[in-house]
Image: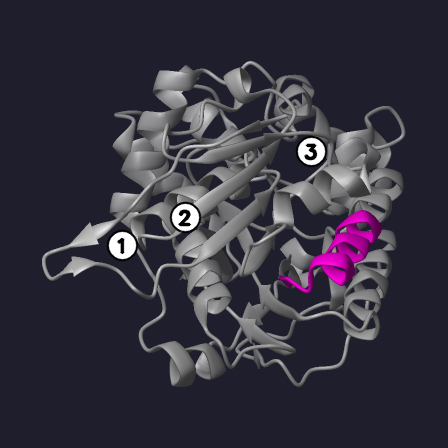
Amino acid sequence: MRHTNKTEYATESGTRSDSMRIAVLGAGGGLGRNVVDAARAAKHDVVALVRDPKRAELPDDVTTVVGDATHVDDVVRAMAGADATMFCVNPPFATWLTTFPPLLACAIAAARKTNTRLVFPANVWIYGPGRAGELVAETRAPAPTSQRGKLRAEMEQQIRAAGIRYAIVRLPEFYGPNVVSVPAPVFQAALADRRALWPGSLDVAVELVYIPDAGRAMVAVAAAADCDGATFHLPGARTTPRQFVELVYQAAGRKPRAFGVPRWVLSTAGVFDANVRGVADIAHLWTHPILLDGAKYSARFGAIPLTPLADAIATTLAWHRASRVSSPALMANFAHEVDPGAVHAVAAALGRPASGGG
């Protein structure tokens, strides 16, 4: 079923001749919705594959294709006639290891049939622990040490070997409107005046990308005719978890309270909670974060999209305040159950770190 809206975009000098048709798979999710908004802002025609148009709540000028991202024929219908397709499908974290690969296989098959460039949002899971002060460029070979990292590296290789047109944009951990990943519980905790939990040390240098900035960068790559087969790294704002938490709580008018959860606590809790088990699997990226080198992106596209941290936090906080997300953010249930005092007591008995990276 296809809902079609014929849309013509105009500028001060008239109708745009460089407007593209961009398909978005997973348009109702966090990254997908922000990519839709970025593509519309760049005056592109947008086609969105969604299961339920009412639930997706997309703008009226977006053409919606109702279908399932696990069905090749549905994905082909969405991609047909598109200049680029944004792969923004992101299944639940708890089942990600088994549900993500078939979704990518379906998109690759559809890209072959339509000869549409597939733009894939990669992440830093494919790397092992980062080294302080080091920036990771696109030439760095994958060295995954986690289940999710190994699978991510295999998926990227599948794209490169598939004989399709593609581009890859590597992102750090992201936050922002419509996002319920690791940083999201910080915003929820601030609004509820509770202590925030963070996986790992509060005082290491981390990189967080504001998801509307990621959307703008992905659309720029999608629109560039010379980027077939290219990979770009997109850095985010560099801060520490402690500084990030303080900014969020200050924006919420609360006194900052945070606890860095040791890796051994995550591993233990992961026995009972699939989401926390997933966080523990990639916990080395919080204790020894990867920082990305954006020189290649800057050389091709100019300034890296980077909304000031305070502005991005204010907008994200407003979204959480207005939405009161019905599905809890990653680690949100875990956050209610962790007692830092108990962690310190057990840590002392076991000779383990009581907070941060151990």
Residue 291 % position (x, y): 55, 69
64 or 188: which is nearer to us?
Answer: 64
SS category of the residue bearing label 3: helix
Which segment did they paint magenta? 104-117
Query: Label 1 crowding class (10 Å Cα cut-off): few <14, some 14-19, many 20+?
Result: few
CB contact under 8 Å: marks 1 and 3: no
Can you identify the residue that label 3 sits on? 344
The answer to which of 327 and 2 lies nearer the viewer is 2
Tell me residue 199's x, y (percent): 64, 43
Q: Which residue is mark 1?
A: 308
Within 10 angstroms of label 2, few (less than 14), some, or many (20 or more) residues? many
Q: Which residue is mark 2?
A: 45
- Give me the C-alpha separation between circle 1 and circle 3: 36 Å
Q: Is residue 173 left or right of residue 77?
A: left
Q: Nearer the viewer, residue 192 or 230?
A: 230
Query: Would you identify the image quadrant in which residue 180 lies?
Result: top right
Percent of width and height locating residue 276: 76, 33
Q: Look at the magenta stretch and give its main secondary structure.
A: helix
Query: Colour mode?
Result: one colour
Q: Is residue 18 left or right of residue 4?
A: left
Q: Pick whichever of labels 1 and 2 is earlier in the sequence.
A: 2
* Side of 156 relative to 32 (left or right): right
Q: CA distance from mark 3 to mark 2?
A: 54 Å
Camera-near label (1 vs 3) is 1
Tell me the CA gap for discs 1 and 2: 28 Å
Q: Can residue 262 be seen at all in this image of the molecule? A: no
The mark nearer the N terminus, 1 or 3, is 1
